[in-house]
């Protein structure tokens, strides 16, 4: 049985061991607002289907979702548009390239992004969010995330959103390329504004763990009994998390940890242990692939201690 942590103290021991790795990474600096994060901070939370949970470390610290939001927006769009429509514009294959690469767009047939977890694919998916304005579309995303966390206070960090918008030249380039090839058809500045706000949605590691638990339980909130995400869509999201969720370190992560997980360059990681629990982590110091250094280390220790890997089952 996986995920059998029984106390905050038990988790704190793992945090203490992993924290020494924070000095091996550095915070994201290409988005100026993220550079302000404490590189030594580390928190972890586990959330179980029965509502019980444990947490340790700097649990009051809030993290912006960044690329973690890609999974959630994908779920929302699949629910609204359907699998056939979504995957006619974005592929299902992993890539060994960096998450913000433009290279595969130039060589791939019909300039179709390889998957929804790279920036080009995520921009394509965000383009599909329904609504007549940026605010209406953003509120659809935010409402969905509040439902997943059962936390109506979740909002977005305006400083981070503004910082991302002002430094999004590469994402603008990707968007113009996609528009040229008729993958998207909206005003690029509107798309960049929406995407920047989506990435700046902010929560703590306990909220991340709760979302992970909903995905782990095939889209159902066991406490409320509500099927928030259809089971087949939750399965698709978890599959992308396994194959593409940790950027171009996803294969190594699958071997060393072996759970569906999605990271963001803010240092957040959301994990979903199928049928067992959700995990939320925040550690801002990143490795060269853009993943939390201490976060990866704590998940490796948890995987070994609690036999988390889905490949053991």
Image: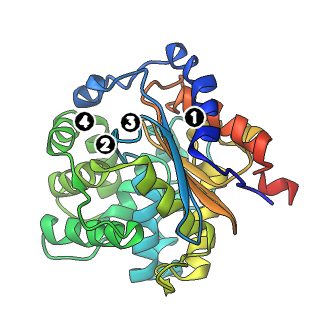
Give the foreground label among 4 and 1: 1
Q: Position of residue 7 (x, y in %)?
A: 61, 47
Tag 4 secondary structure: helix
State whether residue 132 appears in this view: yes
Q: Which residue is mark 4?
A: 169
Q: Residue at x 23, y 62 (%)?
A: 153
Whole-number angstrom distance, CA of label 3 to CA of label 1: 22 Å
Q: Secondary structure at mark 1?
A: helix
Farthest residue, direction right:
312
Q: Which x, y percent locates residue 183? A: 37, 63
Q: Residue at x 22, y 65 (%)?
A: 138
**Image spot of residue 202 (x, y percent):** 29, 49
Q: Are the residues tagged 4 and 1 within 8 Å (C-beta)?
A: no
Query: Relative to 85, is 68 above or below?
Result: above
Name the residue: 51% across, 46% down. 55
Looking at the image, tell me whether mark 4 or mark 3 is earlier in sequence order. 4
**Secondary structure of residue under mark 3:** loop
Residue underneath mark 3? 266
Residue at which label 1 appears: 12
Pointer 2 with pointer 4, Cβ within 8 A: yes
Marks 4 and 3, how far apart at CA: 19 Å
Q: Nearer the viewer, residue 222 or 299?
A: 222
The quadrant holding residue 18 is top right
Q: Quadrant of the N terminus?
A: bottom right
Q: Of residues 193 and 88, which is closer to you in this image?
A: 193
Which one is earlier in the sequence, the residue at label 2 or at label 1? 1
Above or below, 301 relative to 29: below
Residue that carries the numbered disc 2 in the rendered image: 171
């Amino acid at each position: 049985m996986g995920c059998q942590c029984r106390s905050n103290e038990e988790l704190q021991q793992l945090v203490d061991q992993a924290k020494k790795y924070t000095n091996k990474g550095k915070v994201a600096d290409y988005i100026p607002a993220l550079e302000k994060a404490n590189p030594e901070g580390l928190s972890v939370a586990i959330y179980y289907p029965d509502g019980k949970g444990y947490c340790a470390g700097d649990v009051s610290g809030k993290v912006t979702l960044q690329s973690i939001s890609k999974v959630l927006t994908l779920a929302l769009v699949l629910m609204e548009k359907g699998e056939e429509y979504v995957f006619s514009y974005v592929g299902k294959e992993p890539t060994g390239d960096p998450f913000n690469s433009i290279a595969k767009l130039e060589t791939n047939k019909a300039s179709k992004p390889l998957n929804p977890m790279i920036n080009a694919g995520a921009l394509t998916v965000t383009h599909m969010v329904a609504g007549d304005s940026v605010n209406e579309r953003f509120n659809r995303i935010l409402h969905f995330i509040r439902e997943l966390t059962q936390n109506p206070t979740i909002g977005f960090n305006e400083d981070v959103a503004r910082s991302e918008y002002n430094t999004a030249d590469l994402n603008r380039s990707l968007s113009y390329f996609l528009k040229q090839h008729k993958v998207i058809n909206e005003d690029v500045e509107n798309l960049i504004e929406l995407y920047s706000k989506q990435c700046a949605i902010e929560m703590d590691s306990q909220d991340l763990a709760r979302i992970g638990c909903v995905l782990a339980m095939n889209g159902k909130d066991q406490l409320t009994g509500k099927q928030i995400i259809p089971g087949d869509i939750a399965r698709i999201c978890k599959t992308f998390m396994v194959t593409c969720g940790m950027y171009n370190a996803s294969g190594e992560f699958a071997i060393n940890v072996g759970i569906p997980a999605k990271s963001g360059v803010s240092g957040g990681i959301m994990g979903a242990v199928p049928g067992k629990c959700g995990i939320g982590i925040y550690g801002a110091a990143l490795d060269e692939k853009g993943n939390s250094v201490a976060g990866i280390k704590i998940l490796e220790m948890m995987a070994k201690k609690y036999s988390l890997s889905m490949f053991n089952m």
